[in-house]
Amino acid sequence: MFDRLEDAMFRYDEILNELSEPDVLNDTVRYQKLMKEQADLEPIVTKYKEYKEKKAGIEDSLAMLEEETDEELRELAREELNECKGSVEKIEKELRILLLPKDPNDDKNVIVEIRAGAGGDEAALFAADLYRMYCRYAEANHWKVDTMNSNENGIGGFKEIVFMINGSGAYSKLKYESGVHRVQRIPATESGGRIHTSTATVAIMPEVEEVEVELDMNDCKFDVFRASGNGGQCVNTTDSAVRLTHIPTGIVISCQDEKSQLKNKDKALKVLRARLYELERAKAHDAEAEERRSQIGTGDRSEKIRTYNFPQGRVTDHRIKLTLHRLDAILDGSLGEMLDSLIAADQAIRLSRLNEEG
């Protein structure tokens, strides 16, 4: 571990020197690449410098205990020694986490697909609740939400809604949300007061660039049609909606939220690239069966991951067996504690795996 930390410090200093060179300043692509690498290394280097300072503090305290005869000063040295030892243990754990291989998609925007599952209209209403939850969470993080397609059920719910969240690190936070979300509550349409169980499926996909996915436009069939639903006076009068069919996979994507056919086509292609990328990642995961079994879960749409229980006011994540009695706040976008717990659990699993290997 310490060899890697020394290499990181050396590379960090190298980058700082390179960034001051005139030829680098005049090369925008190279400059941005180096700035990105510097930003990735900075937390590691800062934490490693702190580690070295605490190690030096331990040595100084031990030296003082050997040389000093004044009992008051020796007591101060003992306090400093204990504080530094505790800090070193804590920082070592933090450094191990910082050195874990980074998911290359972590800094990307995300495309979110929410679909109503079992439960009819109640499932569609729950899908709308989840959509609002993610929108409020995005708003709290100053991220932008851009709706790509929606299919309403007429009473305020969504049979399906697809949207993009634009924001630095959006995927790193939201990637654990993929799977089946379950709600237990008395539907507004239920006259007998019985609790119903309904589900909605969430898929979180990183936005991918054109160069990351090979897409032959000859494999794509575009149909245009008249949009339906809310969207202003133009929505029902022009053939602006786009239906994209990817012939090899049979994937069909509809986009109708923009008044411009060109913009809807562009959004449909973004969703298609994200889905094709996810298909490739699923194949890779299947090839690494052991890793797939041990991970927290970042993509399996059939996995029941969370229950929202209204009578008890609780939300339970089944993967990490965490229950929070803050249902209203969570549905209002306060997802931080839940997501941080999932990230910590995933890091613990990956650290354990590294320790077993090494």
Image: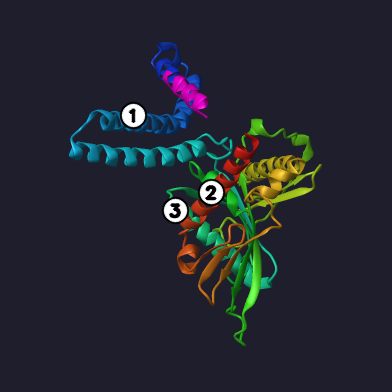
Residue drawn 73% across the image and 39% down it: 284
Relative to 78, 304 lies left or right: right
Magenta residue span: 1-13
Residue 68, given in percent of the width and then of the height, sits at 22, 31
Verify CB contact (< 8 Å) between mark 3 and mark 1. no
Per the image, is 261 magenta? no
Disc 1 marks a residue whose amino acid type is Glu
Tell me the residue that label 3 is attached to. 139
Mark nearer the viewer, 3 or 2? 2
Q: Earlier in the sequence, mark 3 or mark 1?
A: 1
Tell me the residue that label 1 is attached to. 59
Magenta stretch, overall SS: helix
Where is 168 relative to 68, above or below? below
Which circle marks residue 343 in the picture?
2
Disc 3 marks a residue whose amino acid type is Glu
Q: Quadrant of residue 177?
A: bottom right
Where is 51 relative to 306, above or below? above
Per the image, is 3 magenta? yes
Residue 58, given in percent of the width and then of the height, sits at 34, 33
Residue drawn 55% across the image and 52% down it: 342
User: Within 10 angstroms of label 2, few (less than 14), some, or many (20 or more) residues?
Assistant: some
Relative to 170, 115 lies left or right: right
